[in-house]
Image: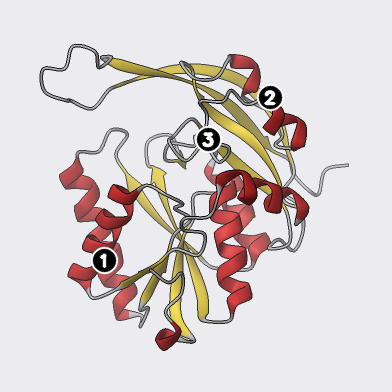
């Protein structure tokens, strides 16, 4: 499948923004292509803790990203542990509102998860929107080399504890980091091995300032998978908290 549909040139699009590296690189390519007019960022927020879902990044830092990128930010506030029905209802309401604003395309930073891509396409089709995947099927190692070469800077804010040791959370992604990654971990963390917060790069007007806070360990219930006894009952994650820095402070 072609990365971009040339028949949809200059169509109005919103970007499904997670705040991480894949989102940043996909947005860079979407804007550079000239095929879409990207006019809004859409982000899922944990309504209770006011943090980006899954990544755990504070809402204030997300807002600073959007301001530096220069795009309006639309937040979908979700319960702490939303059911699939709650999630899909919230998404539907927000997508319908975006369609009324004449948006026609939704852009994602997905790379190779076929099931997720198909799910997104199907959900959007019910609303009458189209999905775009600028970095789809690109090699993960190649993407990370390009990410670094372009001058993007990002920090690991969440890691899956059974795949990466605690020392990885809070690290900056550079070539040394890529060399240190275990062979069973995708260079982009596409299987959920880690999540990041991008704080500088060619899509930003200025870097996002922050300081490192505490590292927190949390466990989450694993999805139900029938009677498979090999499936763990929960998964553990380390989170690196990031604290916003007031630019006005001396």
Left or right: 149 as drawn, with respect to 238:
right
Q: Residue at x 46, y 15 (%)?
A: 162
In terms of depth relative to the viewer, which is nearer, 172 or 86? 172
Residue 74 occupies quadrant: bottom left
Q: Earlier in the sequence, mark 3 or mark 1?
A: 1
Task: Please state the horizontal and vertical placement of residue 234, each as a whole percent of the image.
Answer: 31, 16
Label 3 neighbour load within 10 Å: few <14, some 14-19, many 20+ = some
Q: Position of residue 249 (x, y in %)?
A: 83, 43
Kindly identify which numbered label has been placed on residue 124.
1
What residue sits 36% from the left and 80% below the top?
Answer: 101
- In this rendering, the answer to whether 207 lies above or below 2 is above
Q: Give the label on residue 186, or none.
A: 3
Find the distance from the CA under tag 3 to the CA under tag 1: 28 Å
Pointer 3 or 2: first along the chain: 2
The picture places residue 188, in percent across and down from the top left corner, at: 55, 41
Along the horizontal axis of the image, is 228 left or right of 111?
Answer: left
In the picture, the quarter occupied by the C terminus is: top right
Q: Which residue is mark 2?
A: 180
Secondary structure at numbered mark 2: helix
Q: Give the residue at the far right of this rendering.
A: 250
Above or below residue 175? Residue 184 is above
Task: Decide: is 233 above or below 55.
Answer: above
């Amino acid at each position: 499948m072609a990365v971009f549909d040339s028949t949809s040139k200059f169509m109005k699009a919103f970007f499904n923004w997670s705040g991480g590296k894949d989102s940043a690189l996909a947005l860079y390519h979407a804007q550079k292509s000239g095929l879409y007019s990207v006019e809004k960022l859409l982000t899922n927020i944990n309504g209770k803790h006011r943090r980006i879902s899954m990544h755990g990044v504070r809402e204030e830092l997300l807002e600073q990203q959007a301001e530096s990128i220069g795009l309006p930010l639309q937040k979908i506030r979700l319960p702490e542990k939303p059911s699939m029905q709650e999630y899909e209802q919230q998404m539907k309401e927000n997508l319908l509102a975006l369609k009324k604003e004449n948006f026609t395309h939704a852009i994602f930073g997905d790379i190779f998860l076929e099931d997720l891509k198909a799910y997104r396409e199907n959900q959007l089709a019910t609303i009458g929107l189209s999905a775009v995947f600028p970095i789809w099927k690109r090699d993960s190692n190649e993407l990370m080399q390009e990410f670094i070469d372009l001058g993007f800077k990002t920090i690991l804010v969440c890691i899956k504890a059974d795949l990466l040791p605690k020392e990885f959370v809070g690290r900056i992604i550079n070539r040394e980091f890529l060399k240190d990654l275990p062979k069973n971990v995708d260079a982009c963390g596409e299987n959920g091995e880690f999540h990041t917060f991008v704080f500088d790069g060619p899509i930003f007007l200025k870097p996002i300032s922050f300081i490192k806070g505490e590292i927190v360990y949390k466990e989450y219930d694993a999805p139900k998978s029938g009677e498979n006894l090999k499936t763990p009952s929960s998964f553990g994650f380390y989170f690196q908290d990031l604290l916003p820095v007031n630019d006005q402070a001396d």
